[in-house]
């Protein structure tokens, strides 16, 4: 799928022998919560990637179906409830009703807000505020889950015929079944966006890999701060595709609150939302629906190179410059 993507035989890839390995949320930093939003706000990340440039042409993700595989979501959140069109729980929590996706961590709710928080007065605005969200819970209250839960969620997303899958979770070793599920998704025309991981040490020649972000078939996203400086925690490796804002990101949180979090977990949904906008734009400009490969190519055209090694930024910072 990838353009300028390092092929598999160049990767450090250790397959785990565990039957059903543990998957965890990408470790993130809680900067604060219970923020008040008094006026309509475009978070700095939304402006940094220049999403309003496409909003001006009415490209706001309308009709684009996005599956968020995460810790669930507060589906009654005032910013999100009109954006959520489907839910499913793949964890043992609340299994008496698979349609309960209570987010007991807050992570999934935060990710959802970055992507699609609605564009109404006095509310935060997400990157693609008219996109449609499917909340697929594969992480429980401990912030962890099983690879099989994620795989089941991916297969469910394929059945739903979503356009994009967003995952901000990872594990240190590869899992063949997980990779196979992701391949199946991409073969069905679904763009898969993953957080690159937060094991970085600031040394751009010392590589850290997290899966599924390290798979060739996904779009691996690193994080930068407000000044477009790579976040110290963002993984460096040979398969980073691009970077997006991921430091001090204010977004939705359970119980109608807001929180500021940092991590590649926050950068990945910026790219997910960007793909939704580009899908609207490309459908209009090219007068046809682009394949996932073609959409990826457009994403890379909408990046700008930073003054850092490619191992930390990939193709560069996502930036929706006018064209």
Image (tube, rainbow, N blue to C red):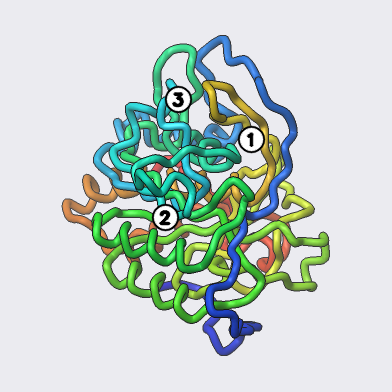
Secondary structure under tag 2 reads loop
Question: Along the polypeptide, which appears first: circle 1 or circle 2?
Answer: 2
- The part of the image, by quadrant, that contains residue 200 is bottom right
Q: Is residue 167 left or right of residue 247?
A: left
Q: Farthest residue to the bottom: give it.
A: 9
Q: Is residue 33 left or right of residue 301?
A: right
Where does label 1 land, which residue?
249
Assess disc 2: are there few (<14), some (14-19) or many (≥20) residues with their C-alpha within 10 Å of its C-alpha.
many
Q: Quadrant of the N terminus?
A: bottom left
Question: Along the polypeptide, which appears first: circle 3 or circle 2?
Answer: 3
Residue appearing at x 32%, y 57% in the figure = 157
* Circle nearer the viewer, 3 or 2: 2
Q: Is residue 63 left or right of residue 29?
A: left
Where does label 2 land, which residue?
90
Residue appearing at x 60%, y 49% in the figure = 265
Question: Along the polypeptide, which appears first: circle 3 or circle 1?
Answer: 3
- The part of the image, by quadrant, that contains residue 31 is top right
Instruction: Give the CA distance from mark 1 to mark 2.
Output: 28 Å
């Amino acid at each position: 799928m990838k353009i300028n993507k390092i092929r598999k035989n160049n990767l450090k890839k250790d397959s785990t022998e565990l039957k059903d390995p543990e998957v965890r949320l990408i470790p993130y930093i809680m900067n604060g919560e219970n923020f008040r939003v008094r006026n309509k706000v475009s978070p700095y990340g939304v402006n940094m990637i220049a999403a309003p440039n496409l909003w001006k042409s009415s490209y706001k993700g309308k009709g684009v179906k996005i599956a968020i595989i995460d810790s669930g979501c507060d589906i009654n959140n005032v910013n999100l409830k009109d954006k959520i069109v489907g839910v499913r729980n793949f964890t043992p929590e609340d299994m008496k009703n698979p349609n309960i996706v209570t987010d007991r961590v807050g992570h999934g709710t935060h990710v959802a807000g970055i992507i699609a928080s609605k564009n109404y007065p006095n509310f935060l605005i997400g990157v693609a505020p008219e996109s449609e969200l499917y909340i697929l819970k594969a992480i429980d209250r401990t912030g962890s889950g099983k690879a099989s839960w994620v795989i089941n969620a991916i297969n469910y997303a394929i059945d739903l015929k979503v356009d994009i899958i967003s995952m901000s979770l990872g594990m240190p070793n590869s899992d063949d079944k997980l990779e196979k599920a992701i391949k199946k998704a991409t073969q069905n025309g679904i763009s898969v966006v993953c957080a690159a991981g937060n094991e970085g040490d600031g040394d751009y020649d010392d590589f850290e890999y997290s899966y599924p972000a390290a798979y060739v078939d996904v779009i691996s996203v690193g994080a930068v701060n407000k000044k477009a400086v790579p976040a110290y925690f963002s993984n460096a490796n040979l398969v980073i595709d691009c970077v997006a804002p991921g430091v001090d990101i204010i977004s939705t949180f359970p119980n109608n609150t807001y929180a500021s979090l940092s991590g590649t977990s926050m950068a990945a949904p910026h790219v997910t939302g960007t793909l939704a906008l580009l899908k609207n734009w490309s459908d209009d400009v090219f007068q046809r629906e682009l394949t996932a490969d073609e959409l990826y190519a457009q994403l890379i055209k909408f990046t700008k190179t930073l003054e850092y090694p490619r191992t930390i930024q990939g193709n560069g910072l996502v930036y929706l410059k006018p064209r």
